[in-house]
């Protein structure tokens, strides 16, 4: 102790109580930060799960219609001659409509734009099934190409968005602890 300075028992008690209060505040703050980080991680994982389910269902629906479109040159004629094919196309278009809603609700802005971009194509194909106008049949090829383009775009977006950890995590992991 420094000469001439005395510490009373009450001062020591106040210093001890202050230490307990500061320790409790620091502990509470650390717990709060941990809870926030866990909550954000869980929300991100839930969002990724919803996106993964929406993208995979949508890609499956696109596969339904593209599987029917095996012979592009004959597709319009097949629709005229085979009522079962026309019904299968209607069912595939319905699947695309239903699964696109999930992408619109859970997808990223890029995915939502891609899905909205094929609404016109979906309606044009549905109109081609109803009408006997041959000009609709001639426009089937570019409309189906839009489906192929959107399938590629959603597949690439899914890989980019859901393919693994954030790119910064990959960079940090590659450096290793000893590399500066």
Image (spheres, rainbow, N blue to C red):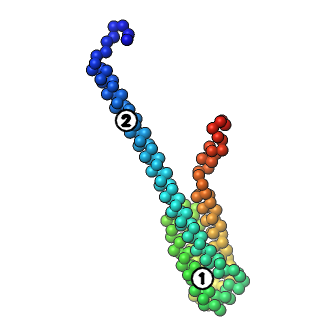
Q: Callout 1: helix, strand or loop? A: helix
Where does residue 154 sit, x and y in percent of width and height? 61, 65
Binning the other alpha carbons within 10 Å of mark 2 as few (below 14), some (14 to 19) or many (20 upward) gives few
Where does residue 96 sit, x and y in percent of width and height? 56, 75
Query: Quick one: which residue is furthest to the bottom in this view?
Result: 81
At a point 59% along the width and 52% down the height, the residue shown is: 165
Q: CA distance from mark 1 to mark 2?
A: 64 Å
Give yes or no for contact between labels 1 and 2 (Cβ–Cβ under 8 Å).
Answer: no
Is 108 situated above or below 89? above
**Where does label 1 land, which residue?**
89
Going by the image, does 2 lie left or right of 122? left
Q: Which quarter of the image is occupied by the N terminus?
A: top left
Query: Quick one: which residue is furthest to the left in this view?
Result: 10
**Where does label 2 land, which residue?**
25
Q: Earlier in the sequence, mark 1 or mark 2?
A: 2
Going by the image, does 46 lie left or right of 134? left
At a point 59% along the width and 51% down the height, the residue shown is: 166
Q: Which quarter of the image is occupied by the C terminus?
A: top right
Pick the front one: 94 or 29: 29
Binning the other alpha carbons within 10 Å of mark 1 as few (below 14), some (14 to 19) or many (20 upward) gives many
Where does residue 85 sit, x and y in percent of width and height? 62, 86
At a point 66% along the width and 72% down the height, the residue shown is: 148
Q: Mark yes or no: residue 101 visible.
A: yes
Question: In the picture, residue 16 is in which quadrant?
Answer: top left
At a point 65% along the width and 67% down the height, the residue shown is: 152
The image's mark for residue 153 is none
């Amino acid at each position: 102790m420094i000469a001439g300075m005395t510490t009373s028992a009450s001062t020591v008690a106040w210093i001890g109580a202050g230490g307990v209060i500061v320790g409790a505040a620091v502990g509470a703050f650390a717990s709060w930060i941990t809870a926030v980080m866990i909550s954000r991680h869980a929300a991100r994982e839930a969002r990724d799960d919803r996106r993964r389910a929406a993208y995979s269902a949508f890609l499956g629906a696109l596969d339904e219609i593209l599987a029917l479109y095996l012979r592009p040159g004959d597709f319009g004629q097949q629709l005229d001659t085979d009522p079962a094919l026309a019904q299968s196309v209607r069912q595939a278009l319905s699947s695309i409509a239903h699964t696109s809603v999930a992408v619109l609700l859970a997808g990223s802005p890029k995915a939502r734009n891609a899905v909205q971009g094929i609404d016109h194509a979906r309606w044009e194909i549905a109109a081609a099934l109803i009408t006997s106008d041959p000009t609709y049949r001639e426009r089937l090829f570019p409309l189906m190409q839009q489906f192929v383009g959107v399938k590629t775009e959603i597949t690439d977006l899914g890989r980019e968005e859901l393919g693994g950890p954030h790119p910064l995590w990959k960079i940090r992991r590659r450096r290793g602890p000893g590399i500066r």
